[in-house]
Image: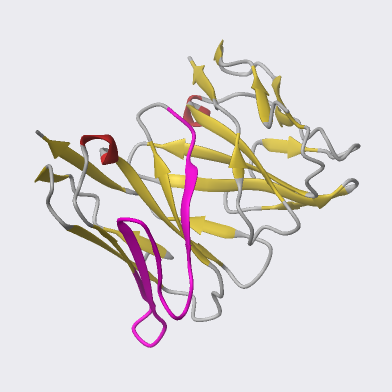
Amino acid sequence: NAGVTQTPKFQVLKTGQSMTLQCAQDMNHEYMSWYRQDPGMGLRLIHYSVGAGITDQGEVPNGYNVSRSTTEDFPLRLLSAAPSQTSVYFCASSSPTFTDTQYFGPGTRLTVL
Amino acid sequence: RKEVEQDPGPFNVPEGATVAFNCTYSNSASQSFFWYRQDCRKEPKLLMSVYSSGNEDGRFTAQLNRASQYISLLIRDSKLSDSATYLCVADTGGFKTIFGAGTRLFVKA
């Protein structure tokens, strides 16, 4: 049981590049979410999903896309990277709802130059 | 005003001390509350949920005051291993949770 896994662990992008952050969980959790964490800001919700095929926006969705084709996977796409997207990104999952314990992946540290 | 506010600290305490953190939330519709712990450069992990009647888990006690819209976490007999950032979390009444910015705790020998 690996829990929540994220790849890559580190990434450096140039402004304007696109990429996908991967997130997978093997706990059969329905609820998955993406957060970004910046110094002094806490974790801010980017997008979330309550089940396969269902996604919705969080607090800071601009510049990011998500999809949920399976229960296990919830990738986050950066469409055109900007320096303001330099951050640590965490994926989380919980079951049966968001009000239960959220299990976080180890994070992806992204730098946009 | 942030939806969930915490004193950023840092709190510097000696081993064995009792330390208390407070957190305020602005959404009166919030129903679920949590404390998470985050070690340096690691992912957050659930420390405890916060129930209306208050709850205790070993050296940790959480309290909820709905009238004043604040949540507290009390740590008794602090250990060096308690050094971490403590994140207060509240739901928004929908399918979202809001994290506070965290309170840093340093426990010194």
Front position in the image: A82 or B43: B43
Quarter location, residue B5: bottom left
Q: Where, quadrant-wise, is the N terminus of chain B in this rendering?
A: bottom left
Can you give x and y, in whole percent of width and height, for residue B25 in the image?
A: 41, 70
Residue lying furthest front in this view? Answer: B58
Q: Which residues are magenta?
A: B42-71
Residue visible at 30% across and 56% down in the picture: B59
Q: Position of residue A1 (x, y in %)?
A: 73, 28
- Is A10 in the magenta? no
Query: Is B3 situated left or right of A81 in this image?
Result: left
Q: What colouring does the structure picture have?
A: secondary structure
Residue B2, visible in the rendered structure:
no
- Residue at 30% x, 58% y: name it: B6
Outermost residue, bottom direction? B67
Number of numbered callouts drawn: 0
**Quarter occupied by the C terminus of chain B:** top left
Q: Is residue B88 above or below residue A113?
A: below
Provide residue B10's location: percent of width, then percent of height.
17, 44
Task: Give above or below for B73 relative to A43.
Answer: below
Q: Is residue A35 left or right of residue B51?
A: right
Q: Check if residue B58 falls in the magenta segment.
A: yes
Residue at 83% over, 38% down:
A67
Can residue A104 be seen here? The reply is yes
Vertical position of residue A95 compared to residue A16: above or below: below
Q: Residue at x 50, y 21 (%)?
A: A109
What percent of the width, then of the height, locates residue B104?
Answer: 25, 43
Q: In the drawing, does residue A12 fall left or right of residue A64?
A: left
